[in-house]
């Protein structure tokens, strides 16, 4: 593993050219075979935006709505072999296939886990012709807690607990909180991989399930033959197949919140391989979560919650690490082999009691060394996706103005956009 720097070293500021403005918190960007642009809007009603996700097509300066009223949050759109694949993370989550010519749509993967902290993420197609997608964790670190109320896209309790992709055995662990449910008793004790207010006995073996949470899975393009690729990626928001056929993923680190808080957790980049375990919920980049470096602001580093580490594959080491809370999201590979990554940025105080303002920029990663340079983007609020266009330029999708605050959310509807940047960056 070669770790990147601390996120402060910067290259030049790239010149941004407007392509599309007025988007409501978009999440995905893809190009069709004629060079047309497709964008997914999340459908999150921040800042007075209308609720319900949309799929837009932009071609020859004309914008068209292909799908609307999708269950939020819509987490991505991918063009493959003439079809669009849409990640609709409602309750339950699902993946849709849309014919952009006829408008015909069908659900190809349904019943995915949700609601929870995270959802089904983007789709990517491998050299084997299979459809790969990631599913985020239902919780921060395996335990349902009151932080569910603080997440702007969730604000729900109870919600579903996590389901493992490998057989696990639980240690005895109890986490006490207030019980704010309607009709609650005033006090709740919750254990890992259990419903809110429930503790499973020590030694409980929880069998692997499919679909599961905190995983990368794959299936046929029509949704058949669903299978696990790898488990233990907390929230692999961005997937990318490199030209050599390897699958890499950004994995967003655990937060200092909830019943099992973790401090100073880096964002990670992994080489995703079949049958491997990537450490969640007990390891971070191969380091035990009980290491003192992961102590939250108020307390000690969490203890293990899994008993059978010796039965699981050794936790994988990352290719690269990024600054805590920088929120590495989606990524793409240039013709010169380098990798552009959108850095969405921190969501303090929603994800930690305090912390510096980080991210909100672009990173360029050298796959020879896995070192990154960072490029500030003052013309963007929060980069969330990047794609190299047919003209060789880098197209950046900006989520828009979105800043969590204590007890509120500062956001501006219609502030999302697509911008173009010459490559290589200045």
Image: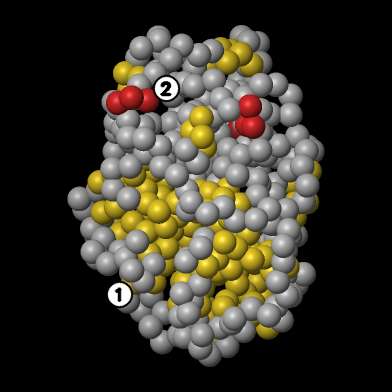
Report helix, strand or loop for mark 2.
loop
- Bin the neighbour count of mark 1 within 10 Å (Cα to Cα): few under 14, some 14-19, many 20 and up: few
- Left-right relation of 299 to 172: right
- Left-right relation of 137 to 295: left
- Left-right relation of 297 to 340: right
Pick the quarter of the image with the C terminus: bottom right
Please give the count of numbered marks on the rendered protein.
2
**Residue 155 drawn above or below residue 42:** above
Residue 415 is situated, as x and y percent measured from the top left of the image, at 71, 66
- Per the image, the residue denoted by label 1 is 81
Looking at the image, which is closer to me, 410 or 51?
A: 410
Report helix, strand or loop for mark 1.
loop
Residue pictured at 45% horizontal, 80% vertical? 335
Looking at the image, which is closer to me, 221 or 353?
A: 353
**Residue 362 drawn above or below residue 280:** below
Residue 138 is situated, as x and y percent measured from the top left of the image, at 49, 35
> Quick one: label 2 or label 1, which is nearer the N terminus?
1
Looking at the image, which is closer to me, 180 or 358?
A: 358
Residue 418 found in image quarter: bottom right
**Residue 59 drawn above or below residue 22:** below
Residue 213 visible? The answer is no
Which one is in front in this view, the residue at disc 2 or the one at disc 1? Answer: 2
- Per the image, the residue denoted by label 2 is 306
């Amino acid at each position: 593993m070669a770790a990147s720097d601390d996120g402060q070293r910067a290259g030049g500021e790239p010149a941004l050219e407007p392509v599309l403005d007025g988007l409501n918190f978009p999440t995905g960007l893809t190009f069709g075979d004629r060079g047309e642009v497709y964008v997914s809007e999340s459908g999150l009603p921040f800042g007075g935006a209308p609720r319900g996700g949309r799929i837009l097509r932009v071609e020859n300066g004309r914008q068209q709505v292909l799908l609307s009223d999708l269950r939020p949050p819509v987490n991505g759109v991918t063009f493959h072999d003439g079809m669009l694949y849409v990640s609709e993370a409602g309750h339950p989550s699902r993946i849709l296939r849309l014919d952009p010519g006829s408008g015909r749509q069908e659900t190809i993967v349904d019943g995915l886990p949700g609601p929870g902290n995270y959802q089904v993420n983007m789709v990517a197609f491998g050299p084997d012709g299979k459809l790969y997608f990631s599913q985020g964790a239902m919780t921060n670190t395996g335990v349902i807690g009151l932080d569910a109320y603080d997440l702007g896209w969730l604000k729900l309790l109870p919600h579903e607990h996590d389901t493992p992709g490998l057989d696990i055995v639980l240690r005895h662990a109890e986490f006490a909180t207030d019980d704010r449910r309607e009709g609650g008793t005033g006090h709740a004790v919750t254990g890992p991989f259990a419903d809110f207010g429930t503790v499973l006995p020590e030694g409980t073996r929880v069998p692997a399930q499919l679909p599961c949470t905190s995983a990368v899975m794959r299936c046929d393009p029509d949704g058949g033959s669903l299978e696990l690729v790898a488990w233990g990626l907390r929230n692999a928001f961005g997937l990318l197949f490199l030209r050599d056929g390897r699958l890499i993923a950004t994995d967003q680190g655990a937060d200092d919140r909830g019943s099992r808080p973790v401090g100073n957790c880096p964002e990670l980049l992994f080489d995703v391989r079949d049958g491997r375990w990537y450490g969640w919920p007990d390891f971070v980049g191969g380091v035990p979560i009980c290491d003192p470096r992961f102590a939250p602001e108020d307390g000690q580093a969490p203890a293990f919650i899994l008993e059978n580490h010796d039965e699981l594959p050794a936790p994988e080491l990352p290719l690269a690490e990024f600054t805590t809370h920088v929120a590495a999201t989606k990524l793409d590979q240039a013709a010169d082999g380098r990798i552009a990554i959108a850095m969405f940025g921190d969501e303090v105080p929603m994800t930690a009691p305090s912390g510096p303002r980080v991210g909100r920029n672009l990173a360029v990663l050298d796959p020879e060394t896995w070192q990154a340079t960072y490029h500030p983007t003052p013309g963007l609020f929060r980069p969330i996706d990047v794609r190299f266009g047919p003209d060789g330029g880098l197209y950046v999708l900006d989520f828009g103005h979105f800043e969590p605050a204590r007890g509120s959310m500062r956001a501006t509807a219609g502030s999302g956009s697509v911008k173009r940047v010459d490559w290589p960056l200045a």
